[in-house]
Amino acid sequence: MTMTLPSALDAEQNVDKNMKISVVGLGYVGLPLAVALSRQFNVIGFDISKDRVSELEAGHDRTMEIDPPVLRASTVTYTTDIAQTAEADLHIVTVPTPVDEGNKPDLKPLESACKAIAPIMKKGSIVVVESTVYPGVTEDVCGPILEAGSGLVCGQDFYLGYSPERINPGDRVHTVDKIIKVIAGQTEQVADILEVVYGAATTGGTFRARNIKTAEAAKVIENAQRDINIAFINEATMIFQKLGISAYDVLETAGTKWNFLNFTPGLVGGHCIGIDPFYLAHRATEVGHDPDLILTGRRINESMAGFIANSVGSRIPAGSKILVLGLTFKENVPDLRNTKITEIVSGLQELGHSVDVHDPLADKAEAQQFFGIDLIGTLANLQGYDAIVGAVAHSVYKELSDVALESIIKPGGLIADVKGIWRGRELSEATKRWQL
Ligand SMILES: NC(=O)c1ccc[n+]([C@@H]2O[C@H](COP(=O)([O-])OP(=O)(O)OC[C@H]3O[C@@H](n4cnc5c(N)ncnc54)[C@H](O)[C@@H]3O)[C@@H](O)[C@H]2O)c1
Protein backbone atom coordinates (compact mmCIF):
# COMPACT_ATOMS: atom_id res chain seq x y z
CA MET A 1 0.00 0.00 0.00
CA THR A 2 1.34 3.42 -0.88
CA MET A 3 1.09 6.00 1.88
CA THR A 4 -0.52 9.38 1.23
CA LEU A 5 2.12 12.03 1.59
CA PRO A 6 1.36 15.56 2.76
CA SER A 7 0.90 18.00 -0.10
CA ALA A 8 2.89 21.19 -0.04
CA LEU A 9 0.35 22.62 -2.48
CA ASP A 10 -3.27 23.53 -1.87
CA ALA A 11 -6.25 22.81 -4.15
CA GLU A 12 -5.28 25.77 -6.41
CA GLN A 13 -1.71 24.46 -6.66
CA ASN A 14 -0.39 27.32 -4.52
CA VAL A 15 1.98 26.76 -1.62
CA ASP A 16 -0.21 25.32 1.13
CA LYS A 17 0.05 27.74 4.04
CA ASN A 18 -1.58 25.15 6.30
CA MET A 19 1.28 22.72 5.92
CA LYS A 20 2.85 22.21 9.34
CA ILE A 21 6.62 22.09 9.70
CA SER A 22 8.71 21.50 12.79
CA VAL A 23 12.34 22.57 12.97
CA VAL A 24 14.28 20.55 15.54
CA GLY A 25 17.35 22.42 16.88
CA LEU A 26 17.20 26.23 16.76
CA GLY A 27 20.85 27.25 16.41
CA TYR A 28 22.75 29.05 13.66
CA VAL A 29 21.06 26.84 11.05
CA GLY A 30 17.66 26.02 12.52
CA LEU A 31 16.49 29.51 13.51
CA PRO A 32 17.09 31.28 10.15
CA LEU A 33 15.48 28.32 8.40
CA ALA A 34 12.44 28.36 10.71
CA VAL A 35 12.03 32.11 10.17
CA ALA A 36 12.36 31.78 6.36
CA LEU A 37 9.87 28.89 6.21
CA SER A 38 7.42 30.69 8.48
CA ARG A 39 6.85 33.32 5.76
CA GLN A 40 5.03 30.59 3.83
CA PHE A 41 4.14 27.82 6.28
CA ASN A 42 2.99 27.08 9.77
CA VAL A 43 6.28 26.55 11.65
CA ILE A 44 7.03 25.35 15.17
CA GLY A 45 10.60 25.34 16.45
CA PHE A 46 11.74 22.79 19.02
CA ASP A 47 14.96 22.96 21.06
CA ILE A 48 16.13 21.08 24.13
CA SER A 49 17.60 24.30 25.54
CA LYS A 50 15.06 26.12 27.71
CA ASP A 51 17.29 29.22 27.73
CA ARG A 52 17.38 29.33 23.94
CA VAL A 53 13.61 28.96 23.66
CA SER A 54 12.92 31.66 26.27
CA GLU A 55 15.35 34.03 24.58
CA LEU A 56 13.72 33.45 21.19
CA GLU A 57 10.26 33.94 22.67
CA ALA A 58 11.53 37.25 24.02
CA GLY A 59 12.77 38.22 20.53
CA HIS A 60 16.48 37.79 21.21
CA ASP A 61 18.79 35.72 19.01
CA ARG A 62 22.18 35.39 20.67
CA THR A 63 23.73 34.07 17.42
CA MET A 64 22.96 37.47 15.84
CA GLU A 65 21.74 35.80 12.65
CA ILE A 66 18.20 37.22 12.90
CA ASP A 67 17.65 40.87 13.74
CA PRO A 68 15.28 41.49 16.68
CA PRO A 69 12.51 43.17 14.60
CA VAL A 70 12.53 40.29 12.09
CA LEU A 71 12.45 37.75 14.90
CA ARG A 72 9.60 39.52 16.67
CA ALA A 73 7.61 39.80 13.43
CA SER A 74 8.01 36.12 12.57
CA THR A 75 5.16 33.69 13.17
CA VAL A 76 7.37 30.82 14.40
CA THR A 77 6.22 29.37 17.71
CA TYR A 78 8.77 27.80 20.04
CA THR A 79 8.69 24.85 22.38
CA THR A 80 10.85 22.56 24.49
CA ASP A 81 8.10 19.92 24.40
CA ILE A 82 8.51 17.67 21.36
CA ALA A 83 4.86 16.52 21.70
CA GLN A 84 3.86 20.00 20.51
CA THR A 85 5.34 19.13 17.10
CA ALA A 86 3.24 15.98 16.67
CA GLU A 87 0.98 17.57 14.03
CA ALA A 88 3.92 18.40 11.77
CA ASP A 89 3.81 17.04 8.22
CA LEU A 90 7.52 17.69 7.94
CA HIS A 91 10.18 17.51 10.66
CA ILE A 92 13.45 19.21 9.75
CA VAL A 93 16.40 18.25 11.94
CA THR A 94 19.11 20.88 12.41
CA VAL A 95 20.99 19.68 15.49
CA PRO A 96 24.80 19.76 15.95
CA THR A 97 27.02 17.06 14.47
CA PRO A 98 30.36 17.49 16.27
CA VAL A 99 33.30 15.10 16.63
CA ASP A 100 34.48 13.45 19.84
CA GLU A 101 37.95 13.74 21.43
CA GLY A 102 39.26 11.21 18.90
CA ASN A 103 37.84 13.26 15.98
CA LYS A 104 35.22 10.59 15.29
CA PRO A 105 31.68 11.68 14.37
CA ASP A 106 29.56 12.21 17.46
CA LEU A 107 26.04 11.42 16.27
CA LYS A 108 24.49 11.53 19.75
CA PRO A 109 22.56 14.83 19.25
CA LEU A 110 21.20 13.59 15.91
CA GLU A 111 20.31 10.18 17.32
CA SER A 112 18.64 11.75 20.32
CA ALA A 113 16.63 14.14 18.08
CA CYS A 114 15.42 11.14 16.04
CA LYS A 115 14.54 9.25 19.23
CA ALA A 116 12.47 12.25 20.37
CA ILE A 117 10.65 12.62 17.05
CA ALA A 118 9.93 8.90 16.53
CA PRO A 119 7.16 8.36 19.10
CA ILE A 120 5.27 11.56 18.22
CA MET A 121 5.52 11.65 14.43
CA LYS A 122 2.32 10.94 12.56
CA LYS A 123 1.86 8.51 9.69
CA GLY A 124 2.74 10.00 6.33
CA SER A 125 5.20 12.51 7.73
CA ILE A 126 8.60 13.30 6.27
CA VAL A 127 11.78 13.68 8.32
CA VAL A 128 14.45 15.79 6.63
CA VAL A 129 17.97 15.93 8.03
CA GLU A 130 19.81 19.22 7.50
CA SER A 131 22.73 18.58 9.83
CA THR A 132 26.02 17.88 8.08
CA VAL A 133 26.72 14.14 8.07
CA TYR A 134 28.70 11.55 6.12
CA PRO A 135 26.95 9.70 3.29
CA GLY A 136 24.60 7.10 4.75
CA VAL A 137 23.67 8.66 8.08
CA THR A 138 20.12 9.72 7.14
CA GLU A 139 19.10 6.33 5.77
CA ASP A 140 21.28 3.97 7.81
CA VAL A 141 21.30 5.70 11.22
CA CYS A 142 18.26 8.02 11.40
CA GLY A 143 15.85 5.77 9.47
CA PRO A 144 16.24 2.75 11.79
CA ILE A 145 15.98 4.90 14.95
CA LEU A 146 12.79 6.52 13.65
CA GLU A 147 11.36 3.10 12.77
CA ALA A 148 12.24 1.56 16.13
CA GLY A 149 10.78 4.41 18.14
CA SER A 150 7.59 4.82 16.11
CA GLY A 151 6.69 1.28 15.12
CA LEU A 152 6.23 2.71 11.60
CA VAL A 153 7.92 1.46 8.43
CA CYS A 154 10.37 3.78 6.71
CA GLY A 155 9.48 4.33 3.07
CA GLN A 156 5.95 3.17 3.65
CA ASP A 157 4.53 4.92 6.74
CA PHE A 158 7.00 7.81 6.85
CA TYR A 159 9.76 9.07 4.58
CA LEU A 160 13.24 10.51 4.74
CA GLY A 161 14.84 13.47 3.03
CA TYR A 162 18.13 15.34 3.21
CA SER A 163 18.79 18.99 2.53
CA PRO A 164 22.23 20.28 3.48
CA GLU A 165 22.57 23.76 4.91
CA ARG A 166 25.09 26.08 3.28
CA ILE A 167 24.81 29.24 5.32
CA ASN A 168 27.92 30.86 6.62
CA PRO A 169 27.69 32.54 10.06
CA GLY A 170 27.92 36.32 9.81
CA ASP A 171 27.43 36.30 6.01
CA ARG A 172 24.60 38.73 5.27
CA VAL A 173 24.69 38.07 1.49
CA HIS A 174 24.39 34.29 1.17
CA THR A 175 21.45 33.91 3.55
CA VAL A 176 19.16 30.90 3.71
CA ASP A 177 16.41 32.72 1.79
CA LYS A 178 18.70 33.49 -1.18
CA ILE A 179 20.98 30.51 -1.79
CA ILE A 180 20.42 27.42 -3.94
CA LYS A 181 19.02 24.71 -1.68
CA VAL A 182 20.04 21.15 -2.46
CA ILE A 183 17.27 18.67 -1.73
CA ALA A 184 16.97 14.90 -1.89
CA GLY A 185 14.06 12.63 -1.08
CA GLN A 186 13.66 8.95 -0.39
CA THR A 187 11.19 8.89 -3.30
CA GLU A 188 10.51 11.23 -6.20
CA GLN A 189 7.27 12.31 -4.55
CA VAL A 190 9.13 13.27 -1.37
CA ALA A 191 11.62 15.26 -3.48
CA ASP A 192 8.67 16.99 -5.22
CA ILE A 193 7.33 18.09 -1.84
CA LEU A 194 10.73 19.29 -0.62
CA GLU A 195 11.17 21.21 -3.86
CA VAL A 196 7.96 23.13 -3.18
CA VAL A 197 8.72 23.70 0.50
CA TYR A 198 12.30 24.86 0.15
CA GLY A 199 11.55 26.55 -3.17
CA ALA A 200 9.02 28.72 -1.34
CA ALA A 201 11.59 29.71 1.26
CA THR A 202 14.47 30.73 -1.01
CA THR A 203 14.74 32.92 -4.08
CA GLY A 204 17.88 30.97 -5.03
CA GLY A 205 15.92 27.94 -6.26
CA THR A 206 16.48 24.29 -5.48
CA PHE A 207 18.71 21.58 -6.91
CA ARG A 208 17.44 18.02 -6.78
CA ALA A 209 20.32 15.67 -5.97
CA ARG A 210 20.14 12.17 -7.42
CA ASN A 211 19.52 10.65 -3.99
CA ILE A 212 20.04 11.22 -0.27
CA LYS A 213 23.60 9.86 -0.10
CA THR A 214 24.63 12.10 -3.01
CA ALA A 215 23.30 15.18 -1.21
CA GLU A 216 25.05 14.15 2.04
CA ALA A 217 28.31 13.62 0.15
CA ALA A 218 28.02 16.94 -1.71
CA LYS A 219 27.73 18.90 1.54
CA VAL A 220 30.64 17.19 3.22
CA ILE A 221 32.99 17.76 0.26
CA GLU A 222 31.99 21.41 -0.04
CA ASN A 223 33.57 21.93 3.37
CA ALA A 224 36.41 19.41 3.01
CA GLN A 225 37.42 21.15 -0.22
CA ARG A 226 37.69 24.49 1.57
CA ASP A 227 39.74 22.89 4.34
CA ILE A 228 42.22 21.40 1.88
CA ASN A 229 42.57 24.63 -0.10
CA ILE A 230 43.22 26.58 3.11
CA ALA A 231 45.73 23.92 4.20
CA PHE A 232 47.67 24.43 0.97
CA ILE A 233 47.80 28.18 1.53
CA ASN A 234 48.79 27.64 5.17
CA GLU A 235 51.63 25.33 4.13
CA ALA A 236 52.80 27.83 1.51
CA THR A 237 52.59 30.56 4.18
CA MET A 238 54.89 28.59 6.51
CA ILE A 239 57.39 28.20 3.66
CA PHE A 240 57.20 31.92 2.82
CA GLN A 241 57.78 32.83 6.47
CA LYS A 242 61.08 30.98 6.33
CA LEU A 243 61.91 32.82 3.11
CA GLY A 244 61.04 36.22 4.57
CA ILE A 245 58.15 36.80 2.15
CA SER A 246 54.60 37.79 3.17
CA ALA A 247 51.92 35.34 2.08
CA TYR A 248 49.47 38.23 1.69
CA ASP A 249 51.85 39.95 -0.74
CA VAL A 250 52.24 36.68 -2.67
CA LEU A 251 48.48 36.07 -2.76
CA GLU A 252 47.76 39.59 -3.95
CA THR A 253 50.23 39.01 -6.76
CA ALA A 254 49.16 35.47 -7.71
CA GLY A 255 45.52 36.55 -7.46
CA THR A 256 45.91 38.61 -10.63
CA LYS A 257 45.80 35.32 -12.58
CA TRP A 258 42.26 34.57 -13.80
CA ASN A 259 42.08 31.08 -12.36
CA PHE A 260 44.04 31.47 -9.12
CA LEU A 261 41.80 30.42 -6.22
CA ASN A 262 41.06 33.00 -3.57
CA PHE A 263 42.02 31.46 -0.22
CA THR A 264 43.88 33.15 2.61
CA PRO A 265 46.03 31.73 5.40
CA GLY A 266 44.72 31.36 8.89
CA LEU A 267 43.03 29.37 11.57
CA VAL A 268 40.27 26.93 10.71
CA GLY A 269 37.86 26.89 13.63
CA GLY A 270 34.10 26.80 14.03
CA HIS A 271 31.54 24.10 13.72
CA CYS A 272 31.95 23.21 10.04
CA ILE A 273 35.17 23.43 8.01
CA GLY A 274 37.40 21.99 10.74
CA ILE A 275 34.92 19.24 11.67
CA ASP A 276 33.18 17.99 8.54
CA PRO A 277 36.34 16.55 6.86
CA PHE A 278 36.56 14.14 9.81
CA TYR A 279 33.07 12.89 8.92
CA LEU A 280 34.18 12.04 5.40
CA ALA A 281 37.46 10.59 6.67
CA HIS A 282 35.56 8.37 9.10
CA ARG A 283 33.33 6.94 6.39
CA ALA A 284 36.33 6.54 4.05
CA THR A 285 38.14 4.46 6.68
CA GLU A 286 35.03 2.36 7.29
CA VAL A 287 34.93 1.42 3.61
CA GLY A 288 38.67 0.66 3.49
CA HIS A 289 40.08 3.86 1.98
CA ASP A 290 42.89 5.80 3.66
CA PRO A 291 41.79 9.48 3.48
CA ASP A 292 45.36 10.74 3.23
CA LEU A 293 44.88 14.17 1.69
CA ILE A 294 41.85 15.01 3.85
CA LEU A 295 43.69 14.20 7.09
CA THR A 296 46.91 15.91 5.99
CA GLY A 297 44.90 19.05 5.34
CA ARG A 298 43.40 18.80 8.81
CA ARG A 299 46.82 18.30 10.40
CA ILE A 300 48.32 21.34 8.65
CA ASN A 301 45.39 23.57 9.59
CA GLU A 302 45.45 22.31 13.18
CA SER A 303 49.14 23.25 13.42
CA MET A 304 48.56 26.86 12.38
CA ALA A 305 47.72 28.26 15.83
CA GLY A 306 50.96 26.87 17.27
CA PHE A 307 52.89 28.23 14.30
CA ILE A 308 51.46 31.71 14.86
CA ALA A 309 52.09 31.59 18.63
CA ASN A 310 55.71 30.59 18.05
CA SER A 311 56.24 33.17 15.32
CA VAL A 312 54.94 36.00 17.51
CA GLY A 313 56.26 34.72 20.83
CA SER A 314 59.82 34.31 19.58
CA ARG A 315 59.97 37.91 18.32
CA ILE A 316 59.49 39.52 21.72
CA PRO A 317 61.48 39.31 24.96
CA ALA A 318 60.52 36.59 27.46
CA GLY A 319 57.83 37.66 29.90
CA SER A 320 56.23 40.14 27.48
CA LYS A 321 52.72 41.48 27.97
CA ILE A 322 50.56 40.72 24.94
CA LEU A 323 47.08 41.85 23.91
CA VAL A 324 45.26 39.42 21.62
CA LEU A 325 42.46 41.06 19.64
CA GLY A 326 39.63 38.64 18.90
CA LEU A 327 38.53 35.33 20.38
CA THR A 328 35.65 34.13 18.20
CA PHE A 329 36.31 31.57 15.48
CA LYS A 330 35.83 34.12 12.71
CA GLU A 331 35.21 37.77 12.05
CA ASN A 332 32.04 39.61 13.07
CA VAL A 333 30.30 36.63 14.70
CA PRO A 334 29.88 35.82 18.40
CA ASP A 335 30.51 32.10 17.79
CA LEU A 336 33.21 30.66 20.07
CA ARG A 337 32.80 27.03 19.03
CA ASN A 338 36.09 25.38 18.21
CA THR A 339 37.93 28.70 18.14
CA LYS A 340 41.66 28.27 17.64
CA ILE A 341 42.58 31.62 19.20
CA THR A 342 42.70 29.84 22.56
CA GLU A 343 45.63 27.81 21.21
CA ILE A 344 47.47 31.01 20.25
CA VAL A 345 46.84 32.29 23.78
CA SER A 346 48.06 29.09 25.45
CA GLY A 347 51.03 28.86 23.04
CA LEU A 348 52.12 32.39 24.00
CA GLN A 349 51.63 31.63 27.69
CA GLU A 350 53.74 28.48 27.37
CA LEU A 351 56.51 30.67 25.97
CA GLY A 352 56.38 32.65 29.23
CA HIS A 353 54.33 35.67 28.10
CA SER A 354 51.31 37.09 29.83
CA VAL A 355 48.27 37.46 27.61
CA ASP A 356 45.10 39.57 27.75
CA VAL A 357 42.28 38.97 25.30
CA HIS A 358 39.70 41.41 23.97
CA ASP A 359 36.62 40.59 21.89
CA PRO A 360 33.53 42.80 21.85
CA LEU A 361 31.42 40.14 20.12
CA ALA A 362 32.20 37.14 22.31
CA ASP A 363 30.04 36.40 25.33
CA LYS A 364 32.16 37.13 28.44
CA ALA A 365 30.53 34.40 30.51
CA GLU A 366 31.06 31.77 27.79
CA ALA A 367 34.73 32.80 27.38
CA GLN A 368 35.23 32.32 31.11
CA GLN A 369 33.19 29.13 31.34
CA PHE A 370 34.69 27.31 28.34
CA PHE A 371 38.25 28.66 28.24
CA GLY A 372 38.92 30.32 31.60
CA ILE A 373 39.57 33.59 29.72
CA ASP A 374 38.49 36.89 31.32
CA LEU A 375 37.85 39.16 28.39
CA ILE A 376 39.01 42.76 28.63
CA GLY A 377 35.93 44.99 28.53
CA THR A 378 37.10 47.93 26.43
CA LEU A 379 40.05 49.02 24.34
CA ALA A 380 39.83 52.56 25.67
CA ASN A 381 42.88 53.61 27.69
CA LEU A 382 44.75 50.33 27.18
CA GLN A 383 48.48 50.87 27.01
CA GLY A 384 51.86 49.46 27.93
CA TYR A 385 51.67 46.20 25.97
CA ASP A 386 54.80 44.74 24.38
CA ALA A 387 52.75 43.33 21.51
CA ILE A 388 49.30 43.31 19.95
CA VAL A 389 48.14 40.26 18.01
CA GLY A 390 45.36 41.05 15.51
CA ALA A 391 43.91 37.53 15.53
CA VAL A 392 40.33 37.99 14.24
CA ALA A 393 39.35 40.42 11.48
CA HIS A 394 36.39 41.99 13.34
CA SER A 395 35.43 45.29 11.67
CA VAL A 396 36.14 47.13 14.92
CA TYR A 397 39.81 46.08 14.69
CA LYS A 398 40.09 46.89 10.99
CA GLU A 399 38.83 50.37 11.79
CA LEU A 400 41.33 51.08 14.60
CA SER A 401 43.31 54.18 13.68
CA ASP A 402 47.12 54.12 13.45
CA VAL A 403 47.26 56.27 16.57
CA ALA A 404 44.92 53.99 18.49
CA LEU A 405 46.92 50.92 17.50
CA GLU A 406 50.27 52.40 18.44
CA SER A 407 48.99 53.88 21.68
CA ILE A 408 48.30 50.37 23.00
CA ILE A 409 51.91 49.25 22.69
CA LYS A 410 55.07 50.55 24.29
CA PRO A 411 57.41 52.42 21.92
CA GLY A 412 59.22 49.76 19.87
CA GLY A 413 56.49 47.19 20.58
CA LEU A 414 55.29 44.59 18.08
CA ILE A 415 52.13 44.67 15.98
CA ALA A 416 51.40 41.14 14.78
CA ASP A 417 48.82 41.04 12.00
CA VAL A 418 47.55 37.48 11.55
CA LYS A 419 44.69 38.41 9.19
CA GLY A 420 46.49 41.03 7.10
CA ILE A 421 44.07 43.73 8.27
CA TRP A 422 46.68 46.43 8.93
CA ARG A 423 48.92 45.78 5.94
CA GLY A 424 48.69 49.25 4.43
CA ARG A 425 49.22 51.12 7.71
CA GLU A 426 52.05 53.61 7.90
CA LEU A 427 53.21 53.13 11.47
CA SER A 428 56.19 54.76 13.14
CA GLU A 429 59.54 53.27 12.24
CA ALA A 430 60.22 52.11 15.78
CA THR A 431 57.14 49.88 15.79
CA LYS A 432 58.02 46.28 14.96
CA ARG A 433 55.67 44.50 12.60
CA TRP A 434 54.93 40.90 11.78
CA GLN A 435 52.37 39.46 9.40
CA LEU A 436 51.69 36.17 7.68
N1 LIG B 1 26.76 26.98 11.73
C1 LIG B 1 26.77 26.95 10.42
O1 LIG B 1 27.03 27.93 9.78
C2 LIG B 1 26.42 25.71 9.65
C3 LIG B 1 26.39 25.79 8.25
C4 LIG B 1 26.02 24.67 7.53
C5 LIG B 1 25.72 23.49 8.20
N2 LIG B 1 25.77 23.42 9.55
C6 LIG B 1 25.41 22.18 10.19
O2 LIG B 1 24.11 22.35 10.75
C7 LIG B 1 23.99 21.60 11.96
C8 LIG B 1 23.58 22.52 13.10
O3 LIG B 1 24.61 23.47 13.31
P1 LIG B 1 24.37 24.82 14.11
O4 LIG B 1 25.57 25.66 13.81
O5 LIG B 1 23.03 25.38 13.81
O6 LIG B 1 24.42 24.29 15.59
P2 LIG B 1 24.09 25.13 16.92
O7 LIG B 1 24.93 24.56 17.98
O8 LIG B 1 24.11 26.59 16.62
O9 LIG B 1 22.57 24.81 17.20
C9 LIG B 1 22.10 23.57 17.47
C10 LIG B 1 20.83 23.73 18.33
O10 LIG B 1 20.32 22.40 18.49
C11 LIG B 1 19.95 22.24 19.84
N3 LIG B 1 19.97 20.81 20.12
C12 LIG B 1 21.01 20.03 20.45
N4 LIG B 1 20.61 18.75 20.57
C13 LIG B 1 19.28 18.74 20.31
C14 LIG B 1 18.31 17.74 20.28
N5 LIG B 1 18.60 16.48 20.53
N6 LIG B 1 17.03 18.08 19.98
C15 LIG B 1 16.72 19.39 19.73
N7 LIG B 1 17.61 20.39 19.75
C16 LIG B 1 18.87 20.06 20.03
C17 LIG B 1 20.91 23.07 20.64
O11 LIG B 1 20.36 23.43 21.90
C18 LIG B 1 21.11 24.27 19.72
O12 LIG B 1 20.21 25.32 20.00
C19 LIG B 1 25.33 20.91 12.14
O13 LIG B 1 25.28 19.65 11.57
C20 LIG B 1 26.28 21.78 11.35
O14 LIG B 1 27.41 21.07 10.90
C21 LIG B 1 26.10 24.51 10.30
Image: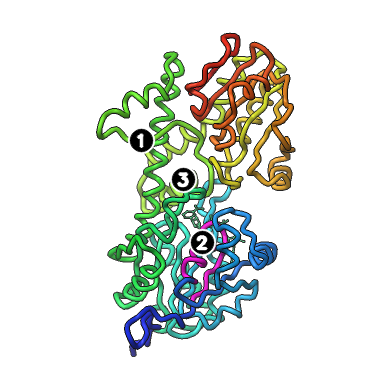
Residue reaching furthest to the top: 430
Q: Amino acid at mark 3?
A: Ile
Residue 178 located left or right of residue 374: left
Q: Which residues are magenta?
A: 21-38
Where is the N terminus found, in terms of image quarters? bottom left
Q: Is 388 situated left or right of 171 in this image?
A: right
Q: Is residue 173 above or below residue 302?
A: below
Label 3: few (<14), some or many (≥20) within 10 Å? many
Real-space CA distance between mark 2 and mark 3, rounded to the nearest whole angstrom: 20 Å
Check if residue 24 falls in the magenta segment: yes
Q: Nearer the viewer, residue 47 or 252?
A: 252
Residue for badge 3: 273
In the rendered image, which quarter is residue 322 located in? top right
Q: Which residue is mark 2?
A: 32
Which residue sits at x=42%, y=16%? 245
- First along the sequence among labels 2 and 3: 2
At numbered mark 3, what does the secondary structure look like: helix, strand or loop?
A: loop
Which-is-in-front pick, marks 2 and 3? Answer: 2
Residue 232 coordinates in the image, percent (x, y): 38, 32
Q: Secondary structure at mark 2?
A: helix
- The residue type indicated by label 2 comes to Pro
Question: What residue is drawn where x is 60% and y is 16%?
Answer: 314
Residue 341 got which mark? none
Residue, disc 1: 262
Q: CA distance from mark 1 to mark 2?
A: 28 Å
| Image quarter of residue 8 | bottom left
State which mark lies toward you, 3 or 1: 1
